[in-house]
C-alpha cells in the first residue's frame, strides 16, 4: 500500500479508528480526526499520544 497522508477522517467509533490506525508519523492526524468528533481539544489529544498510549503496529493500547 503506497504511503499517503491522512486528511480528515470520520470514525464512527473507536473500532473504526483502531482498524484504520496509520503509520506512526500520521498518528496525530488520525487521532485528531477521531477525537475531533468528540470535541476533545488538541492538548488532550497530545496527552493521550504522549502519556496514555503505546503503539504496536495497528493496535492502540490504553495504559
Image: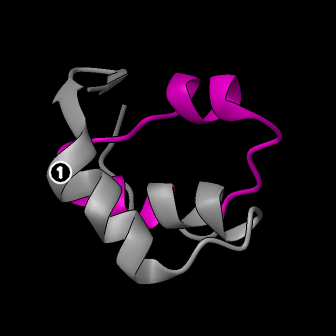
Image quarter where the N terminus lies is top left
Name the residue at 33% across, 53% down: 48
Kindly indicate the quadrant of the structure image that contains residue 54: top left
| Residue 14 is a magenta residue | yes
Figure colour scheme? one colour
Q: Is residue 18 left or right of residue 45?
A: right
Tell me the residue at 72%/73% (across/down): 39
| Image location of residue 44, percent across then percent down | 41, 70
Q: Residues within 10 Å of mark 1 (few under 14, many from 20)?
A: few
Residue 35 shows up from this direction: yes
Q: Classify residue 28 as left or right of residue 24.
A: right
Q: Specify the segment rendered in magenta.
A: 9-30
Residue placed at 66% from the left, 70% from the top?
36
Residue 14: quarter of image: top right
Q: Is residue 56 rendered magenta in the image?
A: no
Q: Which residue is mark 1?
A: 51
Amino acid at each position: 500500500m503506497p504511503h499517503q497522508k491522512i486528511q480528515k477522517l470520520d470514525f464512527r467509533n473507536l473500532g473504526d479508528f483502531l482498524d484504520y490506525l496509520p503509520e506512526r508519523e500520521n498518528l496525530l492526524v488520525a487521532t485528531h480526526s477521531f477525537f475531533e468528533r468528540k470535541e476533545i481539544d488538541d492538548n488532550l489529544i497530545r496527552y493521550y499520544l504522549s502519556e496514555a498510549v503505546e503503539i504496536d503496529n495497528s493496535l492502540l493500547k490504553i495504559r
